[in-house]
Image (spheres, helix red, strand yellow):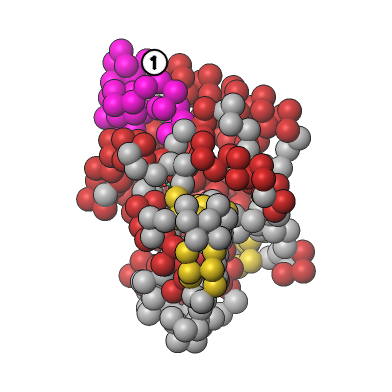
Amino acid sequence: MTSYEDVEFVLRDSRFRKSIDEAMPLFAASAQGSGQQQDRSSLLYDNMANNDPPVHTALRKPLNSSFTARAVAPKRQAMQELAESVLDAVAGQESFDLVQDFAFPYSIGVICDTLGVPREDRETFHQWVQTITSDAEPEVLRRDAQRMVGYLRGLIAQRRETGTDDILTQLAVSLSESQAVAQAYALLAAGYETSANLIVTGLLVLESDPDQKARVWRDRSLVPTAVEEMLRHQSPFNLSLYRYATESVEVGGTTIPAGSIVFLAFAAANRDDARFEDPDRFTVDQPRREHLAFGGGIHNCIGKHLARLEAEVAFDVLVRRCPELSVRTAPQHMDWKASPTFRGLRNLVVAPGPLRSRSGTAETGEAA
Ligand code: HEM
């Protein structure tokens, strides 16, 4: 599905279902299913993204209240501290990699804070996450996934004994051990790259339009609306996860036969000119908020308020501290990841210009 109307229709129609157990034979039977073919032996598939009610409700409900706009708002300060410290680490460099040196370390930091991964374990944790979200060899993927699962299992067992106010504790007290591990894993898998990619592709779209970029750099109060429009324009979650038709359904004049696996092209829907006037236009103060960058229906992104805040804080810090930030990688050298689902670059070299200190003054003599 690629049109806004069709994508929205499928998102809200319960005849398109998610149930990993029912979908497995369909994947196996589908000649085109190879891209998403999965091994059901992994308990990690027992997550909210792979199941409809009642399983979905049982898995998502314990977390809903922790991800509302009101619940995530108090995280702003910690996010800002994190973004500042990640930027401090590249201070003095003429250039740095916005993907590897800023967006990924920042994104993993936000997720670790949210889940409750102790600071001393974060580097190792980040290495596992980088492997499992990469196109490494299957044995390497399996090895690091197993290490990560073992580690999460240990943390969840600890939280059963002594809980705190983090997500791992909520998972530990409301779900079975394997369900809790699978939900933690799903939060990581869904929130790590997407949030980082939004920052990186968001900067790219600003860079492609110097007037829009200058407006944000002159007036940081435009950051929230700019981020909202980046979501529509760049759609970091390009293509949905699977759904399948439980019966024959007509969508936009086409009959989808029962048993078909369906994917929804969020990126295409967000640029559909039947829904958005001049959809390729990007204007920092006129976001088209009805975009589908976070999906919709019961599987809408649980992390959407966290992701928005995360990107807002990142741009706020970048704009304030890097008044001359510019992209150095030429378009023909940009190495896009070969993922059907996530749209992101492997690297993006940027020159920060003279870096401002946290308080906004020139950091070094060179910045005067
Ligand atoms: C810019 C960042 C993000 C984007 C664009 C994004 C986008 C999406 C989209 C489009 C879906 C629906 C997929 C489908 O229906 O097939 C989704 C689901 C989900 N997202 Fe996000 N996401 C982002 C960040 C996050 C973060 C930070 C978290 C958690 C910390 C998160 C956790 C989830 C989960 C658990 C689901 C499955 C929800 C369910 O099935 O009920 N996402 N996301």
Above or below: residue 108 compared with residue 291: above
Q: Residue at x 55, y 60 (%)?
A: 257
Q: Which residue is mark 1?
A: 157
Count up the numbered dots: 1
Q: Secondary structure at mark 1?
A: helix
- Mark 1 closeness class: few <14, some 14–19, many ≥20 residues within 10 Å: some
Tell me which segment is drawn in magenta. Answer: 156-185
| Residue 8 coordinates in the image, percent (x, y) | 42, 67
Determine the image quadrant of residue 38: top right
Q: Residue at x 60, y 23 (%)?
A: 146
Quadrant assignment for the N terminus = bottom right
Q: Residue at x 73, y 68 (%)?
A: 330
Determine the image quadrant of residue 11: bottom left
Above or below: residue 116 compared with residue 356: above
| Residue 197 coordinates in the image, percent (x, y) | 55, 56
Q: Residue at x 57, y 28 (%)?
A: 42
For the residue pair 99 and 265, the one nearer the viewer reads as 265
The secondary structure that dominates the magenta segment is helix
Dot 1 amino acid type: Ala
Q: Is residue 74 left or right of residue 41?
A: left
| Residue 253 coordinates in the image, percent (x, y) | 51, 76
For the residue pair 13 and 284, the one nearer the viewer reads as 13
